Amino acid sequence: MSELHEPEPHEPDLHEPEPREPEPREPELRRLGSDDWALWRELRLAALTEAPYAFGSTLADWQGAGDHEARWRSRLEIPGALDLVAVLDGRPVAMASGVPAEEGGAAAERISRWGGARARARGAGGGGAAVS
């Protein structure tokens, strides 16, 4: 007949680090140029689809005949403009755009911003609203 033995309590190894949950990554901000037009297009069309009430432009304005590379490139070539996207885990999740507030001035005027659900879950993207 065999005896039952209680297992020995496991003593933690003081040299072994405790497992930790990975820290959430911060979105990476990227400044766009006209060669990034396809990325800008993807986010802009998503923004116009999700939050049409928040923009001066409509989805219809940027689709069909309005959806061509030259137009997207020219949008990113506005002199003095700053066009940014937030990238999270390799995917674009938010966008923002600004133009100089006055000729030669240092101030900028935000003309649009939008963040998808993944961006808003991380506190980026401004709650999905935009001004354009």
Image (cartoon, rainbow, N blue to C red):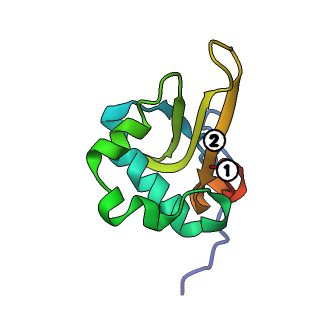
Q: Quadrant of residue 54?
A: bottom right
**Which residue in the protein does label 1 denote?**
131
Amino acid at pointer 2:
Ile
Residue at point 42% right, 46% down? 40
Are the residues flagged by discs 1 and 2 in contact, CB closer than 8 Å? yes
- Give left or right: position of 65 versus 131: left
**Which residue in the protein does label 2 denote?**
111
Report if residue 121 is visible in the image: no
Q: Residues within 10 Å of mark 1 (few under 14, many from 20)?
A: some
Q: Residue furthest bottom?
A: 1
- Give left or right: position of 111 versus 29: right
Residue at point 34% right, 38% down? 73
Residue at point 48% right, 23% down? 79
Q: Secondary structure at mark 2?
A: strand
Where 33 sits versus 20, above or below? above
Q: Quadrant of residue 121?
A: bottom right
Could you tell me residue 57's position as x and y percent? 55, 57
Q: Secondary structure at mark 1?
A: loop
Q: Nearer the viewer, residue 17 or 39?
A: 39
Q: CA distance from mark 1 to mark 2?
A: 6 Å
Amino acid at pointer 1:
Val
Could you tell me residue 32's position as x and y percent? 43, 32
Where 93 sits versus 54, above or below? above
